[in-house]
Image: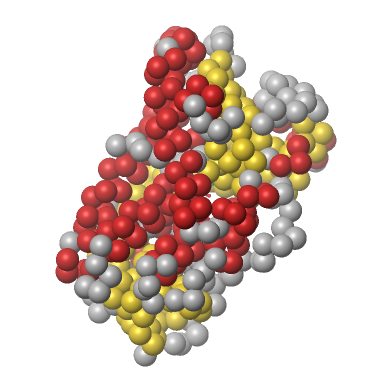
Amino acid sequence: MTRSDIVIVGGGMVGAAAACALGRQGLKVMLLEKRPPAPLEGQPCCQTRASALTLASRRLLEALGAWEVLAPWAQPFDAMHVWSDDVSGEVVFRAAEVGAEALGWVVPNAVVQAALWQRLPETVTVRESGLAALDAEAGTVTLESGESLEARLIVGADGAHSLTRRLAAMPLDSHEYGQAAIVGCVRTEKSHENACWQRYISEGPVAFLAMREGWSSLAWYVPLTRLEETLALPDEVFRARLEAASGGRLGRIIEVDGRAGFPLVRRHARRYVRGRVVLIGDAAHTVHPQAGQGVNLGLLDVAALAEEIGVDTGVDWACTGALQRYQRRRYGDNLLVQRAMDGFDSLFDHGLPWKRPLRQAVLTAGRTLSPARALLTDLALRGRWA
Ligand SMILES: Cc1cc2nc3c(=O)[nH]c(=O)nc-3n(C[C@H](O)[C@H](O)[C@H](O)COP(=O)(O)OP(=O)(O)OC[C@H]3O[C@@H](n4cnc5c(N)ncnc54)[C@H](O)[C@@H]3O)c2cc1C
């Protein structure tokens, strides 16, 4: 039996950040990942999966030494344009309005993950294996390779379909939106102007997020029933449909690379802690991605967990209340963001005619009330929601 202070299941962006943060506190960490990332060098600027990172996420990645290595792939955006096809006017959130350098940075997920892996401290040992079994009370883990591990804490960072969560019998609330996001890399006729562009139409939002080398990261929301058919469209037809959905705002769609689809599901574990098991990132919660908050929330989980258990690294955290404090700090915040995303989803649902004047009122208020706009921008940037 190999003993560590902490076993982290899953070395995606959130699990790798947790390994860096906890390992830097001098804790002996075992990181399990069944599919380790490709090396950073040679990764393209535009990849199918990318995330808009907030200032709060950037600060954490800086503290972990990962930002400096991923910076060449990070595209800052200084404005976010939001409008709806059935009402007039648009809201423009600008970094300058809150005295910030940028509203966020768009980075391929694989780059963030590889940068964190490059910065894993010596206190972290990696096992390239999947999880097979665990005992939440005893703090023991069995790997698919047959190896047994023991730890004071098991961190479940194994994503939305978390096996850690299931094996620890932690209940989950979930809601299927009946919607899917089509992602990919897009080249448009007009420049993205280092901005993000989000248009709401009857099917859902369609968004272009500025990336490096003139590419944009696409998030095009379609009814789930139309996902397969849309993904299978011939390139020319796909581009024409996307151009129509975006209202031609960035001109013709010249190229779409690496399209893929993701059914959208909101999930929230009813508790983040059970015995010696604690959940972080998508293992604990998934949100509607229309405001690009998912991994940012996961990185805030990492910061809170590292702070709570770092207060005293030598104790048995399962008995001290540190894990409960972590849960208290993060649960409400994550729930609030989920509710806010559902609120947007409902507001821009074109199905009910009475919502149209409401949309008009909200967009007009967003355009004209600069203090409200600045407050929203500031909250999103700093990741303080509750
Ligand atoms: C369309 C779309 C757009 C998005 N855009 C944004 C955005 O702009 N900004 C943003 O903040 N978020 C965004 N998100 C959300 C973001 O992608 C996720 O929140 C983020 O990827 C979660 O990271 P994670 O590390 O928690 O989980 P994952 O990325 O799922 O990583 C889990 C890791 O665990 C490993 N693993 C799984 N099971 C096991 C096992 N049994 N044993 C060992 N290892 C295992 C996996 O191989 C993987 O590496 C978006 C999501 C979608 C669907």
Q: Is residue 144 left or right of residue 199?
A: left
Residue 113 seen anywhere in this rendered image of the structure? no
x and y, in percent, of residue 186 in the image: 73, 38
From the viewer's side, name the closer residue of 63 and 189. Answer: 63
| Looking at the image, residue 152 lies above or below residue 287 | below
- Residue 189 position, x and y percent, is 80, 28
Q: How many marks?
A: 0
Say whether residue 92 is left or right of residue 372: right
| Residue 101 shows in this picture | yes
Q: Which residue is drawn at 61% across and 33% down?
A: 77
Q: Residue at x 59, y 60 (%)?
A: 115
Q: Quadrant of the C terminus?
A: top left
Measured along the vertical axis of the image, is residue 2 above or below residue 198? below
Location of residue 279 in the rendering, given as x and y in whole percent from the top left corner: 35, 60
Q: Image point 44% across, 44% down: which residue? A: 56
Q: Which colour scheme is used?
A: secondary structure
Q: Where in the figure is residue 179, as x and y percent of width and height?
A: 52, 38
Q: In this view, does 372 lie to the left or right of 238?
A: left
Residue at 49% of width from left, 71% of height from top? 121
330 or 249, nearer to the observer: 330
* Side (left or right) of 259 relative to 286: right
Tell me the quarter of the image containing the N terminus: bottom left
Residue nearest the observer in this picture, 331 or 384? 384
Against 328, residue 187 (above or below) is: above
Image quadrant in which you'd find residue 140: bottom left
